[in-house]
Amino acid sequence: MAEVSNSNIHLALVHFPVYNKTGEVIVSSVTTLDIHDISRVCRTFGVGTFYVITPLKTQQELVARLIGHWLKGFGAEYNPSRKEALLKTVVKNNLEEAVKEISERSGKRPRVIVTGAKKAPQSIDYESLKEEFKHGEPNLLVFGTGWGLEKNLVKNADHALLPIEGSNGFNHLPVRGAISIILDRLLGNRKLS
């Protein structure tokens, strides 16, 4: 089976600005499990670039060390599939840097699509977004950490993807789980019925 390319679709995991549980804007911590697992999910669905967004130099260094371990030397030899998954994982200071990089590479500003647990005014459903993907223009799916993306990121986005709805009213998925579900719905090789 031929590999499907979704290289015009990129993903950003934002650690700032996000909210904590009391509604304060914070910088959340980068977790190595998120980096490993989300990189693997992105590679599985052929996502162009996975951006880790954090302004903290110590967190940026953590991501760089993690990626470096698996791309060079013993880590690369020990687990080549981990190396392959991390090849397109990069860290940026802020979301604007990711948008700028995509714009420079593609010659066009990407459509920015935020995600979250609440419906936003510019919400779009999965089928409509899948149709937009067919135009081949660059897209950036943005996921928040902590208790969600700061309101201005949501307000300034082109679209907000409709939230994932469970079966019992509880809605606080781990970001790795939400990314897996959303990429499967948008880029998976089966019809949703």
Image: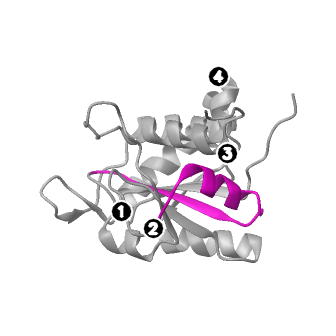
**Amino acid identity at mark 1:** Leu
Q: How far apart are marks 1 and 2 (CA)?
A: 8 Å
Q: Do the residues labelled 4 and 3 touch (CB within 8 Å)?
A: no
Secondary structure of the residue carrying numbered label 1: loop
Q: Name the residue under label 2.
A: 93
Q: Earlier in the sequence, mark 4 or mark 3?
A: 4
- Where is residue 183 shown, x and y percent of the image? 58, 42
Quarter of the view holding residue 68? top right
Question: Magenta segment, which residues?
Answer: 123-146
Which residue is located at x 35 percent, y 38 percent?
174
- Where is residue 140 shown, x and y percent of the image? 58, 62
Which disc, if any, is residue 87?
A: 3
Q: Which of marks 1 and 2 is nearer the N terminus?
A: 1
Q: How far apart are marks 4 and 3 (CA)?
A: 15 Å
Which residue is located at x 72 percent, y 59 percent?
8
Between 23 and 37, the one nearer to me in the picture: 23
Q: Mark 1 points at which residue?
A: 56
Q: Distance between the residues labelled 4 and 2?
A: 30 Å
Tell me: 182 left or right of 146. Answer: right
